[in-house]
Image (spheres, rainbow, N blue to C red):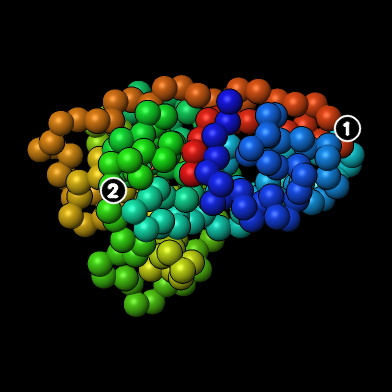
């Protein structure tokens, strides 16, 4: 069963009623709306849990031109782009274009956020301590995200970090992001994970779609369970 917070789907539901209704089971009825509307709504899903494949000749899901991580206040990292996630054993976890990655250390569905940050009262700013003063737009290209064992998210490739307002505050090609929740330099790793109880074993190999529904105009795919 997919779980999504109402806050996320209020916008989606408003734009695409009655396709999405979290009070209903099943809560997604993809053939209850126009294909373009459903597709547009799915693209607003930051978790990447929902994807689609058009069966009516419509445009496929676009791959974002740039790789970005948007910082969510007291919450996860919203990753968008053309990326591959590998676990600490080097196994492929996912190829994707959207994901909500845990940075509090408490998710039971790592590397993805499952909303546990709310239960533990996780606190993190939606910006960085010293934003870069000049941030140019980087080219896209493939991004690699490694969920290191009991360590940070090691991200390599062209990347821009956005604050909570969507403004660029950092760019680089090699950065490590805290995912134990304890760094004093969030969102970046400062090595604190080495001094605390380890909470981030190798993420399981989760490549693939857990379920998919064939309908008239598109195939809706549920890539992983997530909660926002
Ligand atoms: S940031 Fe959401 S569960 Fe960790």
Which label lies toward us, 1 or 2?
2
Relative placement, left or right, of 98 versus 61 is: left
Mark 1 and mark 2 lie on one chain; the one further toward the N terminus is 2
Label 2 CB, ligand 1: below 8 Å? yes
Give neighbour class at mark 2: few <14, some 14-19, many 20+ (Cα, 10 Å). some
List x then y, in percent, for residue 54.
Answer: 81, 39
Residue extending furthest left? Answer: 195
Which residue is drawn at the image coordinates 51% and 35% (left, top)?
Answer: 226
Q: Quadrant of residue 57?
A: top right
Task: Please state, as top left, top right, bottom left or bottom right, where the N terminus lies in the image.
Answer: top right
Q: Which mark is residue 83?
A: none
Q: Is ligand 1 less than 8 Å from the beta carbon at label 1?
A: no
Q: Is 212 on the left or on the right of 70, as rendered?
A: right
Q: Position of residue 178 (x, y in %)?
A: 28, 46
Q: Which mark is residue 122?
A: 2
Mark 2 element type:
loop
- Density class for disc 1 (Cα within 10 Å; few <14, some 14-19, many ≥20) is few
Q: Horizontal placement of 180 versus 162: left or right? A: left
In the foreground, 165 or 154? 165
Q: Quadrant of residue 104?
A: top left
Residue at figure coordinates x 69%, y 50% from the top left: 13
Residue at the location (49% across, 38% down)?
227
Residue 120 in view (yes/no): yes
Image: 184 above or below 104: below
Image position of 150 (left or right of 165)? left
Question: Which SS class for mark 1?
Answer: loop
Q: Residue at x 29, y 25 (%)?
A: 201
Q: Which residue is mark 1?
A: 216
Q: Residue 48: x, y in percent?
A: 57, 41
Quick check: can you spot residue 81?
Answer: no
From the top left corner, tell me how far across and down residue 154 is, in percent: 34, 43
Above-or-below relation of 137 to 50: below
């Amino acid at each position: 069963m997919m779980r999504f917070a109402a806050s996320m789907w209020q916008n989606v539901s408003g734009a695409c009623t009655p396709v999405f209704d979290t009070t209903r089971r099943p809560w997604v009825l993809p053939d209850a709306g126009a294909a373009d509307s459903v597709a547009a709504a799915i693209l607003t899903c930051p978790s990447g849990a929902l994807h689609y494949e058009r069966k009516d000749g419509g445009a496929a899901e676009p791959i974002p031109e740039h790789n970005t991580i948007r910082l969510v206040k007291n919450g996860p990292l919203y990753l968008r782009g053309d990326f591959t996630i590998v676990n600490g054993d080097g196994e492929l976890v996912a190829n994707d274009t959207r994901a909500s990655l845990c940075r509090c250390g408490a998710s039971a569905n790592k590397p993805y956020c499952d909303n546990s940050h709310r239960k533990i009262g996780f606190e993190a700013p939606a910006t960085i301590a010293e934003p870069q003063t000049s941030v140019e737009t980087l080219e896209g290209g493939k991004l690699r995200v490694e969920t290191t064992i009991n360590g940070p998210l090691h991200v390599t490739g062209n990347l821009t970090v956005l604050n909570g307002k969507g403004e660029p505050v950092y760019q680089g090609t090699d950065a490590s992001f805290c995912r134990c929740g304890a760094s004093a330099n969030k969102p970046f790793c400062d090595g604190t994970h080495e001094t605390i109880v380890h909470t981030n074993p190798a993420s399981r190999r989760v490549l693939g779609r857990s379920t998919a529904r064939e309908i008239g105009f598109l195939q809706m795919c549920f890539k992983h369970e997530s909660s926002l």
